[in-house]
Amino acid sequence: MKVAALEASGLCKHFGALHVTQDVSLSLHSGTRTALIGPNGAGKTTLVNLLTGVLKPDAGRLCLFGEEVTRASAAVRTRKGLVRTFQISSLFAQLTVFENVYIAVAQAAGRGFSLWRPAGRQRDLLERTERLVEQMKLQPDMHRKVTEIAYGRQRLVEIAIALALQPRVLLLDEPAAGIPSNELDLLHGAIGTLPADIAVLMIEHDMEMVRRFASEVAVLVNGALLMSGKPCDVMAHPQVQAVYLGVAGKARFDAGAAAYA
Amino acid sequence: MSAVAFILLYGLSYGLVLCLIALGLVVTMGLMRVINLAHGAFAAIGGYVAISLMQQLGWPYVLAVPAAVLAVAALGVVAERLLYVHLYQRSDLDQVLVTIGVNFVVIAVLSMWFGPNIVRMELPSYLKGNIDLGIREFEIYRVVAAAVCLVVIGALWWIFERTSTGARLRAAVDNRGMAQAMGMNVPLLFSATFALGCGLAALGGVLAAPMLPIEPMWPLKYLVLVLVIVALAGHGQVSASVAVAVIVGIVETAGRYLFPQFGGFTIYVLLIGLMVWRPDGLLARRRTA
Amino acid sequence: MTPLPRDSILSRHHWRLGELLWLGAAVACYFAFPEYLALGTSVLVMVLLVQSYDLLLGFAGVLSLGHAVFFGLGAFVAGWLALAGWTEPVSVVLAAAVAAAVLAALIGPFLLRLTGLPLLMVTLAFGVLVFEAAHKATGITGGDDGLSGIQFKPIFGIFEWGLGGATSYLYVLAWLAVLFLLMKRVAASPFGVMLQGIRENPARMRLIGNRVLPHLTLAYVISGAVAGVAGALFTQANAFVGLGVLSLDTSVDVLVMLVLGGIGSLYGALIGAPAYMLLKHFSSQWNPFYWMLIIGVLLIAVVLLGRGGLLGMLQWAARGFRRGRA
């Protein structure tokens, strides 16, 4: 069996008496798209924080392509290919779209301590930046300050930055959050162009996104993993429906499934 | 033994007065998240107003002090509405720069008005002289000042920790938008709080006047000490501020008494060490990440 | 590859007309104002110091109120070396730079973990601490009197240090030109771009794999070294060094000069330092407190109006002019 891209076993986290993450075990394999769903407050963002190293677990192990990273810092994990995006955009506010992506590209290329050759003359970095901007269809906004562009496009800059870091495992924290419905197509398009060989974990509430992109679904409730498996199986499971979807959600999921069948 | 008592009592009274001033800053910084380096200016103005009332208008001490406090509180409201309101959304750097600018302006105006030299505060006769505290004799004034500080600080603690006003204030600190959505008049709250902060500064300045003489450079001269207390006390519980201020007062006093060569240093060394070790303040809990 | 906009942070390596004009003006002053060359030299020293601070504050976003420490260290090292017999000017300046760089490398990793008010406090406290220590150590600093009788050998064996500051002016200008080019290179490099990312969002930098602290420390070292050079040049130009070089006043002055000129481009110093120093010199016959009033008001105005200091206003006017012509 191939080694998992990301293997989490028995992760636990508590804040005082509050157990936010309870014994969560998760495997992500290269090429898969896993959706992490669950009610608000279930601990999804905390789990992502544990996976990326922003929080350290109180118990459990984390391995990236077989290498133990449980105690590694966020920066180290990113360098090893574990990259995330944010639920609330966290960009370099006063800089342009191009500059934002360039920083990530330069960091990934290890040029952080290059002191002599001007940044504006590093052809390879500039070209890579431009390619990523094109991939996200952000050319019209390329040289505008990120705070001045539409919110939906800011989320795309987030993804461009993540891709610049050459991820092997990509964690998307509610990529659709806050995007007005008329801008969602851009996001769907972007997610569709994600490299096929990386492992993607997506926290999402939008059931249509889940149905379109996920090959696997994991359900988190009260900090514990309720179940995981193929989307259809999980969505049809009565427990999941009771806890999370409700009648309306299930109907929307079925409509999405019918549309894309 | 007498020396220890001296250091402790001296340091305690010194620390408590500084604490009063520092609390004013903790209150404003904690609520409005504005780095107000001009806080000392309000304290100095308080001292000048009290002295002017006593010397120019012949007011008695017990009237001049509250009048000065109220005057500065009113001035604080004006300053908040005109100037500080523009600083809330600004970066740390901008706030530092503008408040340094305010300091300069206040110092310049004070010196043009009152002259560049120290202005002595004449205490009423019943506050002069010494009192025998058993262990050794101690200045009456310091004892009274310390007592007043304790009463005011106690009242503040009560308001913040035990009343609903305090709870509302703390709620507005944590989440301004939410507080506003729940019907709290946040701008009014901010103005009132700033007035409170300036009033505390003024009271502290007036009480400190016999110990820290009033002069135009006062705001910058004692800025560092006040900031030390605020920085070490972290995001402002009253108890933390008192503890830190008393420690600072005692350390300062002990330093100057025991090591007159290096007296001034001890507090800075202490500050640097503590800030590098505990950047969130002395009594803050360690962050988990 | 579409070309990058002129004002992008990735375009900082380009030559700008303003730089050449400034250099030309500085050289012109040498011929036009021979009586004021001592003042001119002081201005040039300050320009260098303020530029070093721009690298730290404008690019890396480190708000330090203790920058005078590096200036003062450089100044005193130059004094000590000269009094001990090492009087070759250029090597003394380099030695001062190394001393300042070493200090920065030692304290940087501790200091730079802090941000905001704690950082301000610690740098302020450190600066005051060093000042007080220097004040007490009259043996090595001369206390309130300072160190005098400092003499240096002719520069490159040829240029004598005369009175009136003619040699010093060109000497300091030469150093300024060279260091400006070096700092410009650093600012335009990927390292410089990273610093700006750290200034904007350090948490995000960490999450893209940047460890932040090493970058900030290197910026601190470079900035400190240049400040040390400025200090050594100060001593060489004045044949004297006193405690003023270490004072809080100096640290605050540097901050004010940078803000008035405009932060974050290395050009602000070129405008802010001369404007401030000249204004200060020609208003020195007034009550010093008038000066404080003007600076206070200017500071508040510049920050609240948000035009980016004198430089920002010039750029805004230039843009308007260009748009008007188009």
Image (cartoon, coloured by chain):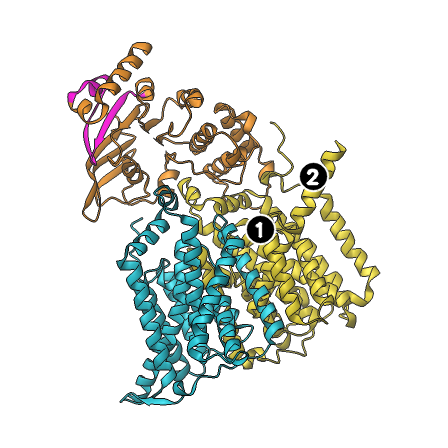
Towards the viewer: A62 or B99:
B99
- Left or right: residue A191 versus residue A223 is right
Considering only order in the chain, which callout, 2 or 1, is on the residue closer to the N terminus?
1
Tag 2 residue: C319
Residue C135, disc: none
- Left or right: residue A76 versus residue B223 is left
Q: Residue at left 38%, top 46%?
A: B176
Tag 1 residue: C304
Residue C40 location, quadrant: bottom right
Which portion, as a residue range, is magenta?
A214-238
Q: Chain of mark 1?
A: C
- Left or right: residue C103 versus residue C325 is left
- Left or right: residue B285 versus residue C187 is left
Q: Which chain is orange?
A: A
Give the colour chain C carries in the figure.
Answer: yellow
Q: Disc 1 residue type? A: Leu
- Whether residue A220 appears in magenta in the rendering, the answer is yes
Note whether residue C125 is visible.
Answer: no
Give the colour chain B carries in the figure.
Answer: cyan
Q: Disc 2 residue type? A: Arg
Q: Report x, y in % for residue B221.
A: 51, 72
Residue C206 location, quadrant: top left
